[in-house]
Amino acid sequence: MNVLEVKHLQKSFGAIRAVQDISFSVQAGEVFTIIGPNGAGKLCLN
């Protein structure tokens, strides 16, 4: 069972495209992380 599903994610900062066409899903019980340097466009969901 998917607890999170992302399809065709895009993120831009002005003219700079940081992420283009990312898709993924996370199943119940899985550990999932997005890593990258500070300022890379990661989003914190609390």
Image (cartoon, grey):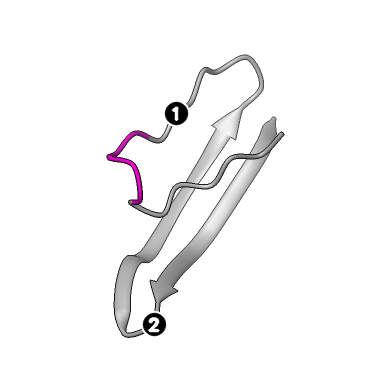
> Where 16 falls versus 41 (above or below)?
below
Residue located 56% across and 33% down the image: 26
Q: Which residues are magenta?
A: 35-39
User: Residue 27's image quarter?
Assistant: top right
User: Callout 1: helix, strand or loop?
Assistant: loop
Mark closest to the chain's N terminus, 1 or 2: 2
> Where 16 falls versus 22 (above or below)?
below
Quadrant housing the N terminus = top right
Residue located 66% across and 39% down the image: 45
User: Residue 38's image quarter?
Assistant: top left
Q: Is residue 37 magenta?
A: yes
> Where 30 falls versus 43 (above or below)?
above
Is residue 27 toward the left or the right of residue 32 in the image? Answer: right
Quadrant housing the C terminus = top right
In space, the residues marked 1 and 2 are separated at their CA atoms by 26 Å
**Label 2: how many residues lie within 10 Å, few (<14), some (14-19) or many (20+)?**
few
Query: Which percent across, then down, holds residue 23?
Result: 45, 54
Q: Nearer the viewer, residue 1 or 6?
A: 6
Which amino acid type is shown beneath numbered disc 2?
Gly
Q: Nearer the viewer, mark 1 or mark 2?
A: 2
Query: Which percent across, then down, holds residue 13?
Result: 40, 74
In the rendered image, the residue lying farthest to the bottom is 15
Residue located 54% across and 41% down the image: 25
Q: How many marks?
A: 2
On residue 46, the disc is none
Q: Which residue is mark 1?
A: 33
Q: Nearer the viewer, residue 44 or 3?
A: 44
Which amino acid type is shown beneath numbered disc 1?
Thr
Q: Which residue is mark 2?
A: 14
Residue located 48% across and 26% down the image: 32
